[in-house]
Every structure is written in C-alpha cells, then in structure tokens.
Amino acid sequence: MATFATSDQLLVVIDPAARQTDGESVRIAKDVLSAGAATKVCLPDGPEEFARALARRGSRRPVVVGDDRALVRAVSQLHRQRDLAGCVLSVVPVGQAALAVSLGVPAGAVAAARAVLDGAARQLDLLVDDSDGVVLGTLGIPPAPARAAAAEPVSVASGRPWLRTTYRSLVRNLAPRPARLASVPCPGPSRLRVEVDGETVVDLDQPVETVSVAPGTGGMASVEVRPLSVGAEATPLRVCGQTVTVAGADFRYRADSAVSGPVRRRTWRVVEGAWGLTLPSA
C-alpha cells in the first residue's frame, strides 16, 4: 500500500454543481489526485455541508472541485473562520471558471489536478469590504449584464431518439421566453463619489459610466473610473491605493461571480498576501 506524507493528504471537496455539470471531469480529477496523494473525498449537498467540510479538514490540504462560485465560497468561508491566512487552497475548475483561470489555475481537469500535486503555493492579495465580504478578482460598478445560464443537460438513452425529441420539445416549451430577458433595462450613467486612500477621484457632479476595482500586487488595489463621455471618448482615470470607498445613490456591483447591493456606500481594503493558492510551479 502506498504511503504519503502529511503534506500530501488532501480533502477533495466536490461542489454539487460540478457533479451535475461535468461528471467526467470530476472523475478524472479524483483519479489523478488519488494516484498522487492520500485523498478524502467529500460530496456536500449544499453550502452548509460545504462549510462544515472545510472547517473539519484537520491537517488535510483542501482542494475544491467546482466553478468560480465554489472557489469564492471556499475563500469566503475560510475568511469567516479566520483561517484563510493559514490555509493554502487548491482548485480543479469544473464549469464556468474564468476567475480561476485568470488567477493562473490551469483550465483542464488533468493539468489542474497535476498542479495541485506538483505546484507551489502563491500568496495573493484580497479585497475585503466593510461587510466582511471578499473579492478575489475585479469588481465592477454598475454590474455588467450576466450571460444567460445554459440549460442543464438531460440524460436520455442513446437508443431512444423519440425520447430525446420529446425532452427537447419540453425544454423549448418550458424555457423562459427571450423577450423577458430583453426587457431588463441596461444600467445607465451613475453619479458616484469615488475615494482612494481618502482622496476624491471623482465626485457626484461628474456622471461615470463604469468603476472597476481589482486587487493588484504589494497590497495595492487598481482603480479605474470611466467618466461619462460626450462626443469624444473620455480618458479613464487610473489610480492605486489601499482603500477604496464608493458612495452615492443606491448602486449595485458585480464582485467575482455575484451581484451585490443595492448599497449607498461601500469601502474595500486590500489585505496583502491574504490567501494562498496552489499554482503550477513553472
């Protein structure tokens, strides 16, 4: 029987959505991880079991198999447990994983699983807001329209084409009409006060099209403000700082994979090297 060091003991937490979205990638990830380390697989049915699994991981290194929402959920949970600084997280992306890939995680299940086994921990900065929420990537104000979610796959016996046709007809009949989505109004210009480290970048008298904030490096956040342009395109304002405060009329913002708000004021601060993520050594 193969033996593994304590550092090679993994807790593999498989998000429920990953099992439904791409069971084959989940199986491949489990096989690769199990071949290279002592793994304990956890199949939580919901957020509460997901949180309990992380809290009871002991000395095992947590590996999240899932999409960007699962990654953000894991980081948020470890942050709430005040255990984020002492934990190195690993991810095998399954599903929508633009955020994970932007952080340097390989997109394929095999490559990502091998990075879990052979990679190295990298400390990353984190945005933490005044409600104790976390942001791993870029937040945007107003939130960009989300893409329509793909319909869940329906398992149909390959030898029964008539049954497949019936299911497709049911999906077409029961699916929301596109006209409903088209009726949602697009966000217009906003009047916001944006402050970086206490200095006003733009005030309420200057309408803005977008504001974006992202954790950079060295404990600094990158802030870009695009004023409303009339005629020629306005030059975006770019600044860096440790704290960013946005205030104004009720506004919403997209942080990673979720839309939050409405709020009238929100402050984000950068925590340098707040969390560790396993990435390919190269």
Image (cartoon, rainbow, N blue to C red):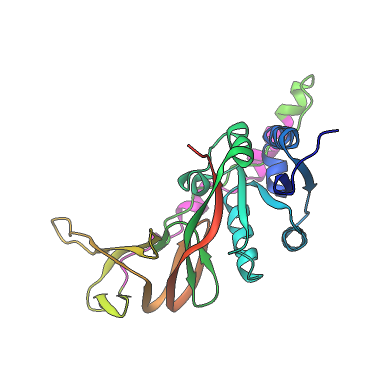
Left or right of 229? Residue 84 is right
Residue toward you, 175 or 210: 210
Residue at x 71% of width, y 44% of height:
8
Asked if the magenta segment contains residue 175, the reply would be yes
Is any part of residue 21 visible from this angle?
Answer: yes
Residue toward you, 114 or 13: 114
Residue toward you, 150 or 273: 273
Residue toward you, 115 or 105: 115
- Name the quarter where the N terminus is drawn: top right
Residue placed furthest toward the top = 159
Left or right of 188? Residue 147 is right
Residue 182, given in percent of the width and then of the height, sits at: 45, 52
Count of labels in the image: 0
Magenta region: which residues?
166-190
Left or right of 261? Residue 110 is right
Tell me if residue 16 comes above or below residue 48 in the rendering. Answer: above
Tell me if residue 160 comes above or below residue 244 in the rendering. Answer: above
Residue 192, given in percent of the width and then of the height, sits at: 32, 75
Residue 11, given in percent of the width and then of the height, sits at: 74, 50
Residue 81 picture quarter: bottom right
Left or right of 206? Residue 29 is right
Asked if the magenta segment contains residue 215, the reply would be no
Residue 25, given in percent of the width and then of the height, sits at: 67, 34
